[in-house]
Image (tube, grey):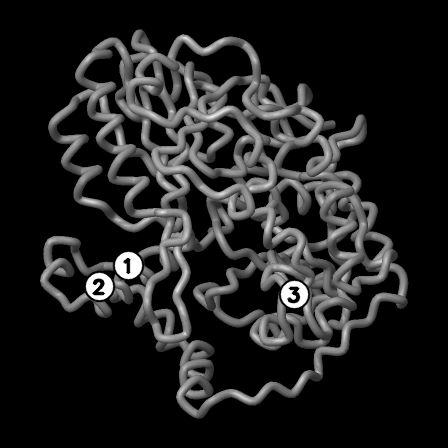
Amino acid sequence: MVDFRFLYEHKAREMESIALISYELKKRGYSCDFFPCNGMGGMPKETAKVIITPYLYQNVHLEAMSRYTKGSNKIVNLQWEQVFPIKDENDSDYEHYPHGVTKTAMHLCWGEREKQALLRCGVKEQNAVVTGPVHMDFLRKEFKGYYDNRDHISKRFNLNAEKEWVLFISSFSGEARKIDRNGNMIDENNYDKSKTIFLSWIEELLKIRTNILFVYRPHPNEKSDLRLLDLSHRYSNFKLIRECSVKQWILVCDKIINWISTSIAEIYFANKNCIIVRPIEIEKEKDMATLADAKKVTSCEEFLKSFNYSETFPVDPQLIKNYYDVEIEASYKRICNVLEKVYKENELIVNKNVIIKYPIILRIKKLFSRTPFYKAYIYAMAKIPEKISSYFPYKIRVLIENSKMRNRDFITEREIEDLYKKLKGLLI
């Protein structure tokens, strides 16, 4: 039996953090393994005493993860999304809060603001524990040297280290848009229009500021965009780079641009400054809670002038601290303390025997996703070149793009071991 099993959704977002937590657990004498939620990691051969999930919103999510939780009723939710638009944050029925049986799991909170939201949803106080944001641990002084320096990054990606590096942290993902009951796309925050306008701003900047090197870091869920490829072909100082974490790029870049990304917190804790751009205004109630009252750049003219920004951070630091509880003790140690308690005690028992009725077609899809053929299908779809897939119908192209993401989001044992080696050299 494995002591702790980590389930993950997005490799780029979660790998470093779950490696850090598991590294500490192994130092304390526990065993760990890792599986992606998308089924690409196969089925576990062993049971696990404690399951650690990336999210847990509905009973259906509990059931979907049951393939990995066989034999365990102890479930801890890392909750990788804890900062929401204002209108959603104040709605106890919001889809990203626990519902049904999932309320009885252990939910780890980055700060007091999230804990209070969970209590309003009906989660018991002992099941909503503030442990702080583990992903911010990598910005603590004891982790200095964990990330590559600017020279290393410039050589890895063939970047001119002498230029002024400007980073844009994109939030233009498919998840920025919603689908209504009729299957139509709802562009609540003017996703498409904002991106189109902002790309024109970038081009104007590239024309007049030849001394900069613009790094466009796509969201993990951001689809391929020919407009970005076109910019990279026409301007040698525009780079489209998916690799490396947001924190890695924040630390080596001179200027940082944000749209609606919650990485505003990473920027703050890295002691960097940034520009928040809003090509199209977002209603306050629909804006991210940490960005609603921030100072924003709303025109191309203002954007071009904003590179001489002052040292004043655009967001109230106290607001960020309300959402991110960063203490003297690192969050990964606080999380491991909670996990040890759950492991040793028998109080946290989640009833996984939830009966959920699915349509016959969905049942067939779910059964298929648990077979070896599913992994082969995803791998084959992911290998279709973009030049060929562009001729396929839209729905097929979406399937191919999703397959590429799922194939890309698999964490290997080698990657975990490499992270352990880096951590061993920094942590006692």
Q: Is residue 315 above or below residue 380?
A: above
Q: Quarter-wise, where is residue 225 in the image?
A: top left
In primary-sequence order, the first of circles 1 and 3 is 3
Q: Which residue is mark 1?
A: 401
Q: Distance from label 1 to label 3 (Cα)?
A: 31 Å
Q: Distance from label 1 to label 2 (Cα)?
A: 6 Å
Q: Is residue 365 above or below residue 302?
A: below
The mark lying in front, picked from 3 and 2, is 3
Element on which disc 3 rests: loop
Residue 410 in percent (x, y) is at 44, 55
Q: Which residue is mark 3?
A: 93
Q: Residue at x 77, y 39 (%)?
A: 333
Q: Residue at x 25, y 39 (%)?
A: 196
The three-letter code of the residue at mark 3 reads Asp
Element on which disc 1 rests: helix
Q: Which residue is mark 2?
A: 397
Crowd band around label 1 with a 10 angstrom C-alpha radius: few (<14), some (14–19), many (20+): many
